[in-house]
Image (tube, rainbow, N blue to C red):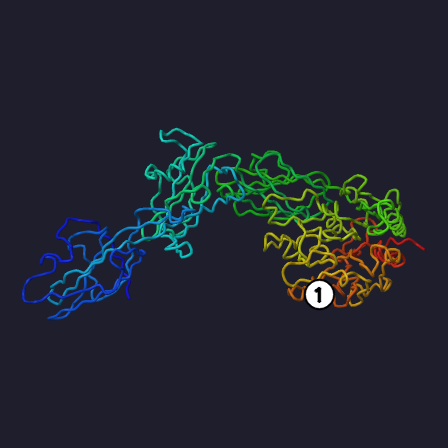
Amino acid sequence: MRRLTIPSLPITIIICSLVMLGCSEEFYGSTDQNLPPNVILSSGPVEGDTTGYRVHFYWTGWDDDGEVAGYEIAIADGDPIGFNDTHYVDVGLINENIFIVTANENPDSLYTNNNYYTRYDMAHTFFVRAYDLEGAKSKPDYRSFTAWTLAPIANITRPVLGGQISTPRYSSIVTFGWDATDPIDMPGNSQDPDSIRYMYTKLVDHEGNEDSGFDILGDMNRSPERYEDKWSDWIAYNAPNDSGRVVIIPTIGKESLELNKKYVFAVQAMDEAGAVTSIFVDGQNARLFWVSTQAGPSLVVTEPHLGSFYFLGDALNIKERELPPEVPLRFSWTADASRYGGEIMSYRYGWDIQNLDDPSEWDVSPNPEIRRTETSKILLLGKHIFYVEAVDNAGTVTLGRISIDIVPFTMERDLLWVYNCNYGTYADWGESYAYQQPIEELYMEFWTDLCSRADGFIPERDIYRAPDDNRLPEIRDISVYKNIIWTYQRATWSELVRFIPESLIEAGVENTTLNYLPLFLAKGGHLWTLGDPDYSGAMASVFYSSPELPASFYYEIDKDHEGDTSGVNSMAYLGYCITVMDKVRAASRKSDPTPIRRVDRDALRFAYLDYGDTLTAKYPDLPDTLYLWEEVTQPGKFFYPVTRGFLYVEIYDPIDWMEVERVQSQSCFHPIYRMRARNSSSQLDHQTVAIWVSKYGHVVPDIPGGVAANSFHFGFPLWYFNRDSAAEIADVVFREWQILAAP
């Protein structure tokens, strides 16, 4: 079956009256002895019926004294009473076809609660006649019908509106993009439209006066003819180079958009039946906007050691950071102007620029392909400023400035203990909650005694109590130490180690606190980190928002933006070599695989040394087994095993979950201790709870007598465990760091 498109015909000069009795002989042929053939419409719409604009007709013919040589057909608009012979089209011997007719009259809302879908219709009459071998023509058979369709709809998708409520502010050059769809006979049965056109104009009233409060969309809906001269030509929706889906305004030859003026941009689509979008709605196929200088590129600058920074505009928005000397810095960046319809045209960068208008002071010339520094920068003592500039197609500039103050790392002292906790006193806890948290007096005594096993430790000097100043130590506070023990609760520790995913940085979120612990490790410093992992504490603090557990630093650093794998640059993954974390006490995942969270199964009974790990096997002085301190497990105490068990435990690279998800541990992941759960059927039984931090174990600090050594991380507070075992662990740590005091 061939498909023909026969153009609809206007009503023309009346030649004859098409009534049931037929027309004159002139309409069908001569009056010689040859009899004219006959034709009938065997199938098609019922006379006067309403149907879709794709209409299927069947016909058949015969010749009583010969044979039919072919057929001629015609389609006339309306319900004509006659038309000229020349409107017929010879179609040969085919006897069926699907015809696409117009349906572009009588617009009406199809749905009373949604006038975005508009119904169009139009009346037509189909004619067919046969002719024989001698040219005689039959009387025509015909059928009148009304074709209908739904008008196509268009949605402006670029610039993205996001959560904006008021009229958005765009640049003086705007890229608009849209999607359009053609619902054939119902919203769910759709195809691409045939073509589109667009218009834009300043908000002016009927007298041509500028009026930002004028209801121009209401006027377009009521009187579309007023704006006909504003529209572009019709463009095929699937035209090359996306010209049917994207336009940059002002277009060539049009006036520039004026600053601080309000405009409207609209898109109209047409389907193959000629129906066009007839309702204009702000935020859908129309966009009201202001032209403003406030619109500028969003610039995100990232450096592996410093983290990421967000900039907007060219105000003096300097970000300040401190760094140790000789840290290799390599910046990368990206900018986005799509939120206001702009496009990024160029970048450039430079160090310590005095005159931003002098091209010679920049390291490179403006270029749209420059997205990173060409080489690493090594900074010595002093203050330096790094500049990045992004420019859009309207010439709007965003300038990023990062000030870096180089702090000398003297590392002349042996050991710093950072008390990053805020525990209560004896008076703060009732008997039934005894030892739910450490008692501050006992906690300070416990860790002071352990730290005093290190050579040169002076409690009055080498304990940093974060709660006293309500702040973290700054990089210059730690730069005088070779080794740090950091015990924590959630609050300020979270501020330090939290990692901002790339997806959030692009939205303008950034971490104002530099996580200098990886820098300390990279300079050859040594760490022992441990503390309260309840709920969102410990390594869970790395996540910007509390994750469902188990959680992958690689795949789930931002649970709301699937596909953001920037967590590979977090301290947990990159520095501590942890791929997945879990907890004894946790909010479990809503999707499979879901560990069963039951205290009577999952709580820790004791931890045991993982001799199977190649690194752990080299340290036979570590205690084989870690049991809880008898004081916290007595009947009536919070962690009495019969009623509750020990909950404050964080798990690393849980085997069962990783096998199901087909995730492997990193080669630098080395367990020290694994846990035994209260029930051997628990999925947390035999999971890792303490690890080596060996990534920088080979680095020798650039100081006299510098020592290369491994670091440590425990997923539980050591205070709750056997005192003799805790002392043995401290001795191994200090021996590794070569600061263990002589007996």
Q: Give the structural element (helix, strand or loop) at label 1.
A: helix
From the viewer's side, name the closer residue of 374 and 520. 520
Query: Is 210 located above or below residue 129 in the figure?
Result: above
Name the side, left or right, on which 661 lies relative to 154.
Answer: right
Badge 1: few (under 14), some or many (20 or more) residues near its Cα, within 10 Å? some
Number of numbered callouts drawn: 1
Q: Is residue 105 left or right of residue 431?
A: left
- Classify residue 133 as left or right of residue 524: left
Quarter of the rendering occupied by the C terminus:
bottom right
Residue at the far right in the pictured view: 743
> Which residue position is annotated with label 1?
655
For this rendering, which residue is in front, 530 or 517?
530
Viewer-proximal residue, 315 or 67? 67
Q: Residue furthest left?
A: 32
Please identify the quadrant where the N terminus is shown: bottom left
- Say whether residue 389 is visible: yes
- Which residue sits at x=76%, y=54%? 699
The answer to whether residue 243 shows anywhere in this view is no
Q: Position of residue 737 (x, y in %)?
A: 83, 54
Give the quadrant of residue 361: top right
Observer-nearest of 449 and 377: 449
Going by the numbered disc 1, the residue's amino acid type is: Ile
Percent across and percent down for residue 486 are 80, 49
Image location of residue 102, percent across then percent down:
29, 52
In the rendering, at what x and y percent does residue 537 appear?
Answer: 74, 51
